[in-house]
Amino acid sequence: MPGIWRWLARDAEQFPAGRLVQPSGDVPNLQMQIPARQATGRAGQRFLLWLDAVGGFLVCLADRVSIGQPVARRVDVPIMADLARLHAWIERRGDGYSLRAARSATVNGRVVKQRATLSDDARVLLGRDVQLRFSRPSCRSRTARLRLESPHRLSLATNEVLLMADTCTIGPGPSAHVRAAGWNREIVMCRNGTELWIHAAAPFQVDGRRCVESSRLTLASRVEGDGFSLALEPLSD
């Protein structure tokens, strides 16, 4: 079992606070500097994840994610296409996902009358021509990935969506939720209640502070380590 997964297996219910190595000078603990209002994981919350040398992702944390046009009524995944304002939902229940359609939709060529199960590598068609690919890259996590395969675009600066459940793995391995071929190590983002944490096997920095093993993140954090870097960008919900 890789080192990162050995760490996760130590306590699957509650991730440890990790050890923070303070820089020189009288600097308070990093955790004390994060206001409660910046904690992540509330239903409906989204953020952008930017990975250097990889690209950007819209991360949706809710168990129910709406898809439709980017109009006044906000949807979680806004697609600039000929869709209804609220066209469909993707729901996560237990270990599985399903698509509920408010307007015309098919999954793997079959018309969705009310609900359809989404298996790994499912092909979703919304309306006449909006094509998406749903995938479950890792059997160790309930996190899924949604990718636009038609020429349409999100109204955000990215066309990849992560439906983040418990963990999200980023790295060069084939089972990573996000494949980062140029990175030399694997990192894991984890949800712990209403908080978002990051773990790496080697020391790294969060917002300029050195951390060992793990650290809590805000929705505006930047993380840098040997061979990798990433940044989070908040979205108003």
Image: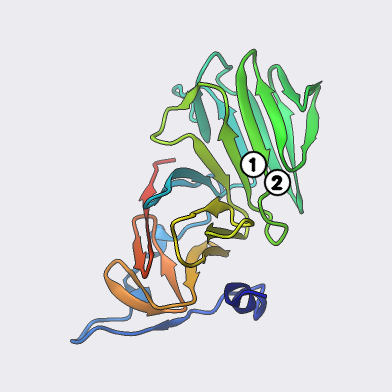
Q: Residue at x 47, y 81 (%)?
A: 18
What residue is shown at x 65% (from left), y 78% (from top)? 11
Which corner quadrant holds the N terminus?
Answer: bottom right
Q: Residue flagged by tag 2: what amino acid is it? A: Arg
Q: Could you classify mark 1 by the number of other residues whose Cα lies within 10 Å: few (under 14), some (14-19), or many (20 or more)?
A: some
- Tell me the residue at 57%/17% (across/down): 83
Identify whether 32 is placed above or below 178.
below
Q: In the rendered image, which quarter contains the C terminus?
A: top left
Q: Position of residue 80 (x, y in %)?
A: 47, 21
- Kindly indicate whether the residue at mark 1 contacts the one at mark 2 (C-beta within 8 angstroms): yes
Specify whether 158 is left or right of 189.
left
Q: Report the coloring of the rendering.
A: rainbow
Residue 68 screen position, x and y as percent = 56, 24
Q: Secondary structure at mark 2?
A: strand
Counting from the top left corner in percent of width and height, residue 36 is at: 41, 64
Q: Is residue 75 visible?
A: no
Can the viewer see residue 222? yes
Task: Give the image location of residue 141, x and y in percent.
Answer: 67, 59
Amino acid at pointer 1: Arg
Real-space Cα distance between discs 2 and 1?
Answer: 6 Å
Query: On screen, 132 above or below 60?
Result: above
Whichever of labels 2 and 1 marks the residue nearer the N terminus, that label is 1
Q: Secondary structure at mark 1?
A: strand
- Mark number displayed over residue 64: 1
Residue situated in front as seen by the camera: 89 or 134: 134
The number of numbered badges drawn on the structure is: 2
Q: Residues within 10 Å of mark 2 (few under 14, many from 20)?
A: many
Q: Quadrant of residue 82?
A: top right
Frontmost residue, 228 versus 153 = 228
User: Which of the numbered marks, if any, corresponds to residue 92?
Assistant: 2
